[in-house]
Image (cartoon, rainbow, N blue to C red):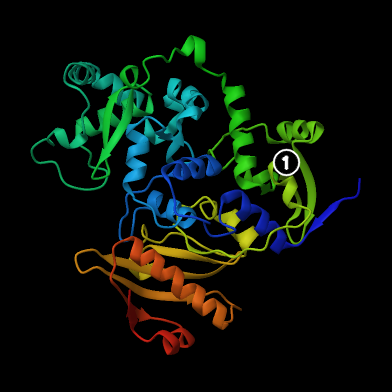
Amino acid sequence: MSTLHLSLKQARQLHLAAQGLLRPPKRKAQLCDLLSTLRQMSLLQIDTIHVVARSPYLVLFSRLGDYPQAWLGEALSSGKLFEYWAHEACFIPAEDYPLLRHRMLSPQRLGWKYSSEWMQTWQQEISQLLQHIEENGPVRSADFTAPAGQKPGWWSWKPHKKHLENLFSAGELMVTERRNFQRVYDLRQRVLPEWDDALHALSEEEAVGQMLRNTAVSLGLFKPGWLADYYRLKRAPVSETLASWLENGEVMPAEVETLGRCYIHQSLFPLLKAIPQPTHTAILSPFDPVVWDRKRTRELFNFDYRLECYIPAAKRQFGYFVLPILHRGALKARMDAKMLRKEKILVVRQLWLEQGVSLAQGMLHDLRQAISRFARWQGAESILLENLPAALAEEWGNGWML
């Protein structure tokens, strides 16, 4: 069999096809599309920053187009998905609960996300908390007050917040809904009354194997070194698994320009005869699966990117919450934006074009349309532009009405 050779552009196109970002949606989104999109990605990372729409909503918007943000909460409360630690905190399709259960049964391996010492020290109070939930129903951290004199701060959690988070990591509590994006916790036995570890749990080996397979499908095209990060797997048997996939025809090798040896999952085999051209322009979340592995993003898209909201303002190269912009198969720009919700204005603080990107009329049109869709979906009625490359400023001025 002759070796398949692909350009870097073709490799990107296959990856974006697997991620649902090659073409814009063909029709108005329906609730079932949200679930199929989540299954296509395998994981939807959660983050609470909301200078623009929160990340999980934005990741879905990039693929679905205009849709009601309430759908995500409906899918969670109806049990079609669940929350747990996967890449990081993620929404995960309900049918994949068995893949993560072994982590819940050994939560001490989750690092800072679980403290055996805390659970032992507060054993009586935690038992009382579980009894309270059993008798009174689901709770939020906000239902409990902080101790007098406790200083505010991200990690100055009140004891009950730590109790709830540790019980969540141990799988004793599950998130049944989010109110104002705050977790609402209930007993696992009440959420999944039919679950029995003896009958339904997978071994860690089985679960890891399926997580690697999910990753291969969601990446579409991949280097072996990209597989483990998707679910943050440690000591994953990548080489052995890949050898098995090659033997049974689940993947095929390909030589890719600048990347070297890569592998293509069989779900993409039908596209190899005529790889479809990318036509989608989308504003991505910093936590989108396409960019959350910064090394993969550099290798595949030649896009050097990091999230700078956690570093001091004076040390930022770009901005607080900079959004990559995908244009027809390549990451060609990045944008620092803020949604003024009361004023119904999307403020583009600054927009940067990647080195070597030239602004043809087609790209100007696509960028303007993408920014307009992004703003309108969040309820904006106008767009205010502050700092733009000269060519864009000449075309767009200070903004436009929607």
Outermost residue on the left side: it is 148
Outermost residue on the right side: it is 1
Outermost residue on the top side: it is 198
Q: Position of residue 145 (x, y in %)?
A: 12, 35
Outermost residue on the front side: it is 27
Foreground residue among 85 and 338: 338
- The residue indicated by pointer 1 is 266
- At label 1, the amino acid type is Gln
Q: Position of residue 374 (x, y in %)?
A: 39, 64
Q: Position of residue 218 (x, y in %)?
A: 60, 44
Relative to 181, residue 335 above or below: below
Foreground residue among 258 and 399: 399
Instruction: Please indicate, yes or no, whether residue 126 appears anywhere in the rendered image.
Output: yes
Q: If the image is split into quadrants, where does the N terminus sit? A: top right
Q: Quadrant of residue 235?
A: top right
Instruction: Please indicate, yes or no, whether residue 316 appears anywhere in the rendered image.
Output: no
Residue at image point 62% right, 65% down: 302
Residue at image point 32% right, 33% down: 77
Residue at image point 26% right, 47% down: 154
Number of dots carrying numbers = 1
Please give left or right for residue 90 compared with residue 297 in the image: left
Q: Position of residue 197 (x, y in %)?
A: 46, 13
Give SS at disc 1. helix
Local packing at callout 1 (Cα closer than 10 Å; few below 14, some 14-19, many 20+) is: some
Residue at image point 14% right, 41% down: 150
Q: Quadrant of residue 347?
A: bottom left
Q: If the image is split into quadrants, where does the C terminus sit? A: bottom left
Please give left or right for residue 165 compared with residue 286 in the image: left
